[in-house]
Image (tube, helix red, strand yellow):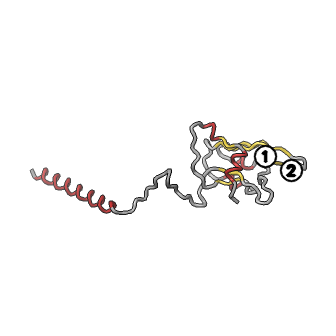
Amino acid sequence: MEKVAKKTFDGFYNLLLGMKTTLEYLFTHAITLQYPKERWTMPERSRGVTALIADEKTKKLRCTACLICERNCPTRAIRIVPAKDETGKRYPQEFEINQGICIFCGICQEVCPFDAIKLVNKYEFSVYHKDKLIYKKEKLAEIGKGYK
């Protein structure tokens, strides 16, 4: 009989303790964002989608197709086809990043000697088909507009 009374008392005590915790947070401001209407502001140093950065004056991509980022990518998510223009300067004829296999480690950004590639703080890039996660040079340049 004594055990039943102790278990009953413990049950009521735990119930009251849970109700106390609920009442403490009932009248406070909610911290949950209502996603499509409210969006989280990402910090400047966050690692989101990869972008190609253009020079502010000439509006041309800073990338010289040196292939350092492609060689250092641990998942081989970057594919570059280099070419030369009429003056002999190298440029990326094709530049693709597969965001589906990218692990957003930031190594490509760190090893680039020209600051041509950056992980920007954009985090919404979900799609229905994984082949749409392969971003070509034009899309990467579009994402990189406005970043230095």
Task: Tell me if I can see residue 77 in this picture.
Answer: no
Residue 138 pos. (x, y %): 72, 46
Q: Amino acid at mark 2?
A: Lys
Image-quadrant location for residue 137: top right
Task: Tell me if I can see residue 31 in this picture.
Answer: yes
Out of 44 and 109, give the one closest to the viewer: 44
Q: Amino acid at mark 1?
A: Pro
Horizontal side of 146 relative to 59 (left or right) equals left
Query: SS for tag 1?
Result: strand
Residue 16 pos. (x, y %): 23, 58
User: Residue at the location (43% across, 56% down)?
Assistant: 32
Q: CA distance from mark 1 to mark 2?
A: 10 Å
Disc 2: which residue: 89
Binning the other alpha carbons within 10 Å of mark 2 as few (below 14), some (14 to 19) or many (20 upward) gives: few
Horizontal side of 29 relative to 120 (left or right) equals left
Residue closest to the far right: 87
User: Residue at the location (72% across, 42% down)?
Assistant: 79
- Quarter the C terminus occupies: bottom right
Depicted 24 relative to depicted 138: above or below: below
Out of 93 and 8, give the one closest to the viewer: 93
Query: SS for tag 2?
Result: loop
Residue closest to the far front: 37
User: Residue at the location (79% across, 60% down)?
Assistant: 57
Horizontal side of 3 relative to 106 (left or right) equals left
Binning the other alpha carbons within 10 Å of mark 1 as few (below 14), some (14 to 19) or many (20 upward) gives: many
Horizontal side of 16 relative to 4 (left or right) equals right
User: Residue at the location (80% across, 51% down)?
Assistant: 64
Image-quadrant location for residue 47: bottom right
Residue 58 pos. (x, y %): 80, 57
Residue 63 pos. (x, y %): 77, 51
Disc 1: which residue: 92
